[in-house]
Amino acid sequence: MITLDWLRKKLAPLVKTKEADKAGIVFFHTGLQVSRFTNSQIHQHMADEERIIYFRILLDGRIGIASTNSIDEQNLKEAFKKALSIARLKLEAKEKKDIPSFRPLKVSSAFWFPQTAHTQAPARIRRLRRIFSDGNSHKLTFSGNLYNGLTELGVISPEGRVNYHTHSFAGIKLIASQGESSGYAHQAGYSMESLNTKEITNIAIEKCLRGQGKVRLKAARYDVILEPAAVAELIAWLNYIGFGAKSVFEETGFLYKRSGKRVSGEPVSIYDYGSDANTFVLPFDFEGRARKKAYLIKKGIAGEPLCDSNYAKLLKLKPNGHANFPDDIEGPLGYNLVMEGGNASLDEMICSARQAILITRFHYINGFLDTRRALMTGMTRDGTFLVEDGKIKSAVFDMRFTESCLEAFRRIKYISKERKLIADHLETLGSVYAPGLYIKGFNFTS
Amino acid sequence: MRNKPKNVILNVMNKQLLRAMLNKLKSKGAEYADIRSVKTGHENISVFNHAVENISFHIDEGYGIRVLYNGAWGFSCGSDFSEKEIEKNIKLAIGIARSSSSLNKTKSVYPAYPAVHAVHSSSYQINPFEVSQEAKLHYLFYTNEILLKPPKIKFAQSTLDFYHTEKLFLNSEGSEIEQSFIESGGYCEAVACAGSLVEKRSYPTSRHSQIRQAGYEYVQELDFHAHAPRVRDEAIMLLSAPDAPCGQTTIILDGYQTAMQVHESCGHPAELDRVLGSELSYAGGSFLTLEKAGRFRYGSKAVNITADSTLAGGVGSFAYDDEGVKAQAVALVKNGIFSDYLTSRETAAAIGKTSNGTMRADSYNHIPLIRMTNINLEPGKPSLGELIADTKEGLFLATNKSWSIDDLRLNFQFGSEIAWQIKNGKLGRAYKNPLYYSTTPYFWNNCSGVANKDSWYIWGIPTCGKGEPAQSMHVGHGTAPARFEKIMVGVKK
């Protein structure tokens, strides 16, 4: 683990160089331990480190970037030199770039649980033993993962100011399997203690047991009840194709020229906010600026896109603290997405349905079909059920949807009060806090 | 062809240190252990319109320790080569394996493999890291200048990527394998806008660089400048093109779209670890269940698919995989019959076979997984022209735009950037937003022809995702355009 002290002592002095107009540093680190299992056996079990240190050098409006995963002094100096040599390239910079400054932020230590960050394999094994035993008693097996770790982000401004944040994390993903049936459940949080593995196990088991005797439905429009994991995947794709300023600048995204205009139903409000404790907090962006609360959609009306300093300048908007990794060419993205909740419960949605499909989660969504409309396709997975007359009637074979997410969001009937943090990809970047949704006439195409 | 970089960007790795690490692992009771020391350098240069979007250079360096202890696996990694850190990571890997073994009811069977001593370097003519960044930028700026010439093209992007990987593999069986790879490539795209319409054309691939195990000569061969006028003109043409029709028809996929089709519907389902459930919690399983090997009619007789990690230039090529198994060419589908899986030492043993050498990790800090090597659709007899001439009515789809497939690799839907009408053996008008969907065995059984070697091309995809934590692998596909009958197209509404 790297500490604030190390950043201040070892990295911060490097920005005070006379060789460049400005220099900045970004540091990102994830330490992860994962017990990955299938057929109720651990098949992959690992301790993984991801670390990257970026040097950004500004010379006459040009920026050079070089990075290394090494904290060896010589390697750091070499990366610095490489960034300098890139910035020295003789180019006529038509748009002068800059490395912005920032004010140091007071960050909370409320998200740091050292025991969770450093939980070792035996503690995970104890939990898994109980989970597998519960599976055995229902004659089903589990696949999935149980993981824990820590995330660190540090940004050093050209003046040598440092913003540093760290949090611990833990999570569990379970797929219970029996024959052709499978059931998914997931939970993530800041501490191992916050994981209710018993409850997650029961949800996965129940979904799997309900999944027997699947019926095939013909492709058509159906009302759907989407659980939070399914909603989170749609929101993640909205983020990827349209919440960021680059998609507005390039005119490809659904927010292009629509700020202040209605883009979805009135109940829909989605924002990104780096300090929202319901997500994995990342209080500042990769330029060191506070990740401000930015409504992308508020009561169905489009807001401003997520901006870093560069796109804010290009689009004549105010930066809202959403700079991405220095070498990322996707542009600004939301890492702390929240969809506001409603008043219903998932049970009430089921009870209210004359006929609907209950969807646990989606698989392999692709949102590049028509990004202006947010047209997406994807499959259902690990728990898809037909609801009739207010009750779950039977399991359903997985189906493909092809649907404009924004148009579907105009047909929302209910939003659940309960929301859930979804971050089932072993990372804490890109978490979504999502409710369940009842959407009328969702388009299934095969 | 030169084989070894003159100006190596990476330092020589310390073999002695790795030997000492292995000895420690053995002395602590490891039944098997391997260590990979990997250094990768990646240069990305991207120009957006008339401005530099990114010039960056990243170096990643470290070692991964994989250990089998009491019949269970453990893995740890580090980038700090100090004795103290190495000792800590050795203990960690063994501790993890020991914990796994306390829970697992079945022990992993890991068959022995002969020790190998080898040195291998991929071939190239011009070391891309010796070409100045000014020259690379000039190439991209001029590409964008061509793309942006007509006012209707509002955005142009062109990108180059270069990778240099050095890998040293040692295992407890005595293998010591040193490999070095240089990869080069890029892509460019033009976006045309008019009112509410936005249309994009890309070359030669979309959303990612087309890469080869080659030097800068491959960037020259890609020749963005020659292709840019067509790319921009087609993007503009799409603004006034109608939407692609809906219904059942014959389709011909260009080589790149065929590569994506092979990737998703053959390469992934043939991975034996998926078949055995290793990826159930993430990417899913496979419809190619064990009883299908050697008897399942995967496709028509025109369909011959080979996994070939010896293919010169393919980014899925190597001399030995990350388990020390020799590169080989294996038929996955022969005359339409599914014949074999992509395997590792452990998974092959589970079905009574020996590994065909497909285990790779994307970096030092990740475990090796079964990965596609170069999964190739072997060329057929007709030329592309003859294939089109032989088609009464249909669509010719080019350049992948969207992709999605279910967790068993059966139900898929793809979109491409453009389609041309085929009528009475001739290409006609262009359509925008073409989509097609089907299920894998139906689709490949309706393959009525693969174009010949004249249009067979090695595609390189740098972003194949698999595993938890996610790994992004470079995989290759040699494909030619292929024709499919009675396929559903256009489900957009």
Image (cartoon, coloured by chain):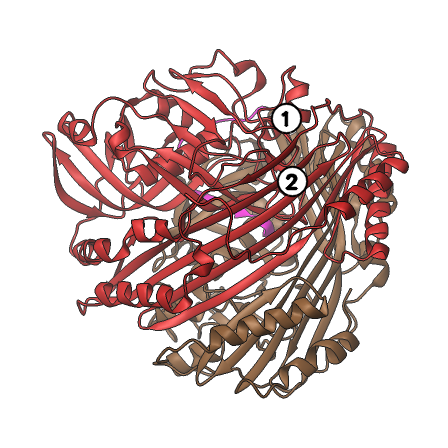
Q: Amino acid at mark 1?
A: Leu
Q: Provide the letter of the chain coloured red.
A: B
Q: Is residue A150 visible?
A: yes
Chain letter behind tag 1 = B
Q: Colour of chain A?
A: brown
For disc 2, the neighbor class at 10 Å (few under 14, some 14 to 19, many from 20) is: many
**Quarter of the view holding residue B41:** bottom right
Residue toward you, B285 or B6: B6
Chain letter behind tag 2 = A
Q: How far apart, in angstroms, are the residues tagged by discs 2 and 1?
A: 19 Å
Residue numbers of the magenta segment: A212-229
The location of residue A407, given as percent across then percent down, is 38, 56
Q: Amino acid at mark 2?
A: Tyr
Residue toward you, A20 or B371: A20
Residue toward you, A10 or A153: A10
Disc assigned to residue A184: 2
The residue singled out by tag 1 in the image is B276
